[in-house]
Amino acid sequence: DIVMTQTPLSSPVTLGQPASISCRSSQSLVHSDGNTYLTWLQQRPGQPPRLLIYKISSRFSGVPDRFSGSGAGTDFTLKISRVEAEDVGVYYCMQATQFPNTFGQGTKLEIK
Amino acid sequence: QLQLQESGPGVVKPSETLSLTCTVSGGSFSSGSYYWGWIRQPPGKGLEWIGSIHSSGSTYYNPSLKSRVTISVDTSKNQFSLNLSSVTAADTAVYYCARFDCWGQGTLVTVSS
């Protein structure tokens, strides 16, 4: 199984400041079709997960442009340019390149 | 707009089979090439992928659960289902059905006698 490791596990951020979450996979996430199926999900308190970013850097419909994804191979990053109160929650990276699909442990974003 | 809704018992007895159904609305299970999955989240913990079924009908399971899991589809009802046998307290979780871009609200299943 591909192991997904997120850092940090907790991120206190001041409103209006940037935030960054790292996700590292135990092996390359490049699929044989050339795509890299690395996804970022947001889970607000009491809510189901919601898709933010797919295939490393494609922002899903309706996701604010302050969210961006980058990376390649085994190292990926989610960045929030200016944190807003509604961004509080847990962020997960997930790989769908190989079965079983696997998730990172989650990073809890909270406001200082 | 695509929507997914889980349904099934909220309590299951130990050693019995957990059965959940995901109803797809605003779209068709069979259209396009998509994976439709089940994911669970124990209270206060992270996400665990249980398995997926492709729109072609092919299934893929988490090896850690494979001996106990069956995912099937009823295209006439636009539903896909999860069966998890021989449940224990460790299977207590919120169960989500999802396509990569859309998640259901989740349903809490508690394993208790």
Image: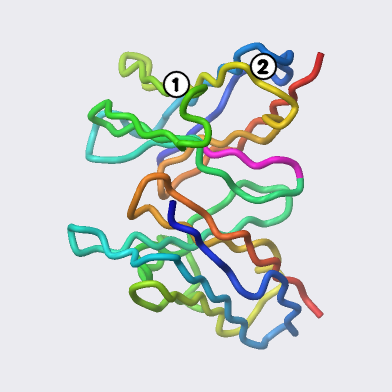
Q: Is residue B80 above or below residue A83?
A: above
Q: Amino acid at mark 1?
A: Thr
Q: Residue at x 65, y 69 (%)?
A: A87
- For marks 2 and 1 on the same chain, the one whose residue lies earlier in the sequence: 2
Crowd around label 2: few <14 · some 14–19 · many ≥20 (10 Å): few
Q: Quadrant of the C terminus of chain B?
A: top right
Q: Is residue B112 above or below residue A82?
A: above
Task: Tell me if B14 is positioned left or right of A4 in this view.
Answer: right
Residue B23 falls inside the magenta stretch = no
Q: Residue A53 versus residue A31: which sits nearer the camera?
A: A31
Q: Position of residue B97 (x, y in %)?
A: 50, 35
Q: Which residue is mark 2?
A: B9
Task: Tell me if A95 is positioned left or right of B106 in this view.
Answer: left
Q: Amino acid at mark 2?
A: Pro
Q: Is residue B34 above or below residue A64?
A: above
- Residue B94 sits in quarter: top right
Dot 1 lies on which element?
strand
Q: Which residue is mark 1?
A: B70
Q: Which residues are magenta?
A: B39-43
Query: What label does residue B8 carry, if any?
Result: none
Task: Tell me if A41 is positioned left or right of A101 in this view.
Answer: right
